[in-house]
Image: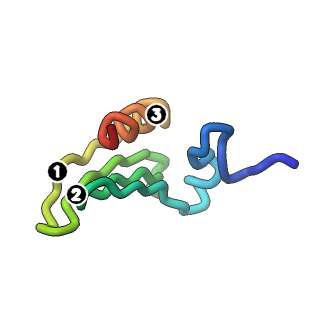
């Protein structure tokens, strides 16, 4: 069976992101999110959940770039 929502690495597929799913990871009061907006742009957002302050936000039309930023932010 083919999973339309997850890759072999466990990331959300482009299809899942287009359907509105959001990839999230929480590390020491920091939340990193990856999602796709309606205009086909991928966003990576990092914020501190305690202070409600933005740490990082970057956008790209390329999922490859967004995945790279997502992985870097959660390291």
Mark toward the viewer: 3 or 1 = 1
Percent coordinates x, y for residue 44 in the rendering: 34, 47
Percent coordinates x, y for residue 60 in the rendering: 37, 38
Q: Earlier in the sequence, mark 3 or mark 1?
A: 1
Percent coordinates x, y for residue 7 in the rendering: 66, 41
Q: CA distance from mark 3 to mark 1?
A: 21 Å
Q: Secondary structure at mark 1?
A: strand
Q: Are marks 2 and 3 in contact (CB under 8 Å)?
A: no
Q: Secondary structure at mark 2?
A: strand
Most distant residue in the right direction: 1
Percent coordinates x, y for residue 20 in the rendering: 54, 62
Counting labels gives 3
Q: Are marks 3 and 1 in contact (CB under 8 Å)?
A: no
Q: Nearer the viewer, residue 31 or 22?
A: 31
Residue 58's place in the image compared with 35, above or below, is above
Residue 70's place in the image compared with 54, above or below, is above
Q: Are marks 2 and 1 in contact (CB under 8 Å)?
A: yes
Residue 53's place in the image compared with 44, above or below, is below
Q: Secondary structure at mark 3?
A: loop
State the residue position of label 3. 62
State the residue position of label 1. 55
Q: Any mark on residue 47, and which?
A: 2
Report the side of 10 relative to 33 (left or right). Answer: right
Report the side of 66 relative to 12 (left or right). Answer: left
Q: Earlier in the sequence, mark 2 or mark 3?
A: 2
Residue 51's place in the image compared with 32, above or below, is below
Seen at 48% across and 54% down, the residue is 23
Q: Earlier in the sequence, mark 2 or mark 1?
A: 2
Q: Quadrant of residue 67?
A: top left
Q: Nearer the viewer, residue 44 or 26?
A: 26
């Amino acid at each position: 069976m083919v999973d339309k929502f997850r890759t072999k690495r466990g990331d959300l597929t482009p299809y899942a992101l287009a359907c509105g799913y959001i990839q999230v990871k929480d590390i020491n009061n920091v939340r990193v999110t990856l999602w796709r907006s309606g205009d086909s742009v991928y966003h990576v957002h990092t914020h501190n959940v305690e202070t409600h302050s933005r740490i990082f936000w970057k956008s790209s039309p390329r999922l490859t770039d967004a995945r790279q930023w997502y992985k870097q932010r959660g390291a």
